[in-house]
Amino acid sequence: MVTRRGRGRPPGESDARARIAAAAVTEFGEHGYDGATVRGIAARAGVDAALVHHYFGAKADLFAEITELPLRPDQEVPLILQGPREQAGERIVRFVLESFERPAVRKRGVIMLRTAVSGKLTAPLVTGFLSRELLPRIAAELDAPDAELRASLVASQIAGLLITRYVVELPAMADADIDDLVARIAPTLQRYLFD
């Protein structure tokens, strides 16, 4: 007698996504972004690595989901850099500021910034993510021997802008109009990127 399996998920897999997410939190916490692997996360969750990719996609996507990243600069900034070169600095600053003006993004973004700056455990996660997923993508769009330094300078400028406007809330920065900030900061980013 052949037992036919019913439709739907196989038994025991209904909680696989939650187990993967929990395993990812532990793996990222223990090994940092760079040290955590999809295979390690899968092994800890008791699933095949293909199932991790099925539910979450790439490691960066899994990290973004479990940390609830409010923005995906690793996806957006390289697209911004593919537009007209002479406006790249302006587009980056405007993208970041307009994104942070959305309440949900601001709330999660401020939490991430605060923990990245002060947390011994979370700083390596954020640094690893930026170093592995964002900065190389910016550098790849630049035709310069010091592309990695240029990408890091852009990141430092944006981090400083976000911290002073949304975390420390320096009055002049917090009250400034987005268009004014774009006009003042974009030329610096433009110089970091292309001059």
Image (cartoon, helix red, strand yellow):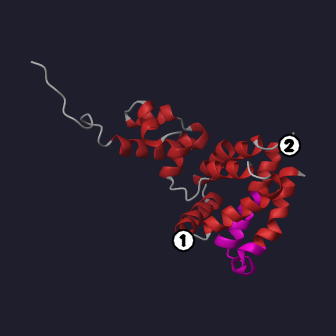
Pick whichever, 156 or 123, lies toward us: 156
Q: Residue at x 37, y 43 (%)?
A: 17
Q: Position of residue 92 (x, y in %)?
A: 72, 59
Q: Is residue 144 above or below residue 50?
A: below
Is any part of residue 135 visible from this angle?
yes
- For this orientation, the residue located farthest to the top is 1
- How many neighbours does mark 1 have within 10 angstroms: few (below 14), some (14-19), or many (20 or more)? few
Q: Is residue 129 above or below residue 164?
A: above
**Residue at the disc numbered 1:** 103
Q: Residue at x 54, y 68 (%)?
A: 107
Q: Is residue 132 above or below residue 168?
A: above
- State the predominant SS element of the stretch in magenta: helix
For badge 1, the amino acid type reads Pro
Question: Which callout, 2 or 1, points at the residue further toward the start of the chain?
Answer: 1
**Residue at the disc numbered 2:** 146
State yes or no: residue 160 in magenta. yes
For badge 2, the amino acid type reads Asp
Task: Indicate the secondary structure of the residue bearing disc 1.
Answer: helix
Q: Is residue 18 above or below residue 39?
A: below
State yes or no: residue 127 in magenta. no
- How many neighbours does mark 2 have within 10 angstroms: few (below 14), some (14-19), or many (20 or more)? few
Q: Position of residue 32 (x, y in %)?
A: 58, 43
Stretch in magenta = 156-180
Left/right of residue 52 with respect to residue 6 in the rendered view? right
Is any part of residue 29 visible from this angle?
no
Q: Position of residue 124 (x, y in %)?
A: 63, 48
Pick whichever, 125 or 146, lies toward us: 146
What mark, if any, has residue 72 been given in the picture?
none
Q: Position of residue 162 (x, y in %)?
A: 69, 66
